[in-house]
Image (spheres, rainbow, N blue to C red):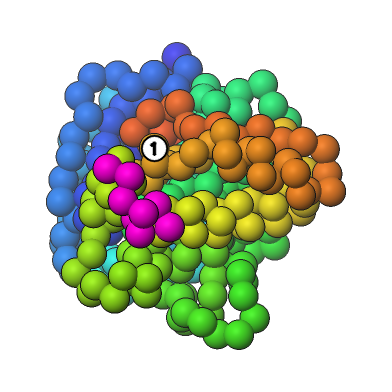
């Protein structure tokens, strides 16, 4: 059975593990802090690969940033990581084949293969955390778009420039439904610049009226975005992942979305592939590159 060295790259942490063709993690999961500079990140990759490459058939990266259709380099925004990171020459890091894919796409593929959307042909996965990522499966293929950047959750929610997004645009889905977006909503309502997402969810549990108002506003923004996604892609399900997914009322969201969409009803699920779905998805995609539609 083939094995991949999967490496999950985020702005603050890098994980790696060896994964087989069944999507099973073999042995220890190693964790590293993401270095601040490009040179240090490259050196960290080389150390991980040098340690494990003789034991695997392929190196599979799950990374922040949009990735080209050839799965060789980053072509889009990478968030809070060294600004030179998109210039990384991934193929030069190992003598073994190197495969690269966006982390949200990898997680979506893991959900499709072994998780919440297994058995479906068309699904959308949305990851709620510091940012909002997305992965789209259409007719059992990962949808990448013309340049590899499909699935970015930066579609416009409002026309009148209420809130600027980290991408530079205005009123993207991400800037309302991510952790920082939720915090911005809370600050607007409470006028408290020090409020945190913890304060919000703790207040909801204590039935604080103002925190419930913030929570409901967040759900309204999620629902509005999901209505658009459901109408565009007609998915069998939308899967929620990321650190904030646990706080979403999926039953409420499903009910509200299905009440307004013009397509057939969809299901709303929480992800089940686990915390390391990015690595698992990267490995499974790397093993079956023919599954990519380019």
Query: What residue is at 27 percent from the left and 37 percent from the top?
Result: 16
Q: What stretch is highlighted in magenta?
A: 206-213
Is any atom of residue 8 visible in this view? no
At numbered mark 1, what does the secondary structure look like: helix, strand or loop?
A: helix
Query: Image height check: is 133 above or below 56?
Result: below
Q: Where is residue 164 in the image (x, y as percent from the top left)?
A: 46, 80
- Closer-to-camera residue (14/43): 14
Which image quadrant for residue 214? Answer: bottom left
- Closer-to-camera residue (183/11): 183
What residue did someone put label 1 on? 246
Query: Image height check: is 104 above or below 155?
Result: above
Query: What residue is at 46 percent from the left and 42 percent from the top?
Result: 248
Q: Where is residue 278 in the image (x, y as percent from the top left)?
A: 41, 39
Which image quadrant for residue 118? Answer: top right
Query: What residue is at 18 percent from the left and 39 percent from the top?
Result: 31
Which residue is outermost to the bottom?
Answer: 160
Q: Where is residue 20 in the image (x, y as percent from the top left)?
A: 41, 20
Which image quadrant for residue 141? Answer: top right
């Amino acid at each position: 059975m083939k094995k991949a060295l999967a490496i999950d790259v985020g702005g603050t942490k890098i994980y790696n593990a060896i994964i087989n063709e069944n999507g099973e993690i073999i042995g220890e999961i190693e964790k590293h802090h993401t270095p601040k500079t490009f040179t240090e990140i490259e050196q960290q990759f080389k150390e991980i690969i040098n340690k494990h490459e003789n034991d695997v058939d392929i190196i599979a990266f799950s990374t922040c940033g949009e990735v080209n259709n050839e799965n060789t380099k980053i072509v889009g925004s990478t968030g809070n990581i060294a600004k030179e990171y998109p210039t990384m020459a991934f193929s030069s890091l190992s003598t073994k084949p190197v495969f690269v894919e966006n982390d949200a796409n990898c997680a979506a593929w893991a959900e499709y293969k072994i998780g919440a959307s297994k058995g479906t042909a068309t699904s959308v996965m949305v990851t709620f955390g510091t940012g909002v990522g997305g992965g789209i499966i259409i007719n059992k293929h990962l949808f990448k778009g013309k340049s590899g950047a499909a699935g970015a959750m930066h579609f416009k929610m409002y026309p009148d420039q209420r809130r600027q997004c980290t991408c530079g645009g205005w009123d993207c889905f991400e800037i309302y439904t991510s952790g920082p977006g939720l915090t911005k909503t809370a600050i607007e309502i409470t006028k408290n610049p020090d409020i945190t997402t913890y304060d919000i969810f703790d207040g909801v549990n204590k039935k604080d009226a103002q925190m419930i108002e913030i929570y409901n506003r967040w759900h309204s923004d999620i629902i509005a975005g999901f209505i658009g996604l459901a109408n565009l892609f007609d998915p069998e399900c939308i899967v929620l992942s990321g650190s904030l997914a646990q706080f979403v009322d999926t039953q409420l969201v499903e009910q509200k979305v299905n009440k307004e969409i013009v397509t057939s009803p969809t299901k709303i699920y929480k992800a089940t592939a686990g915390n390391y779905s990015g690595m698992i998805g990267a490995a499974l995609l790397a093993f079956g590159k023919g599954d990519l539609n380019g």
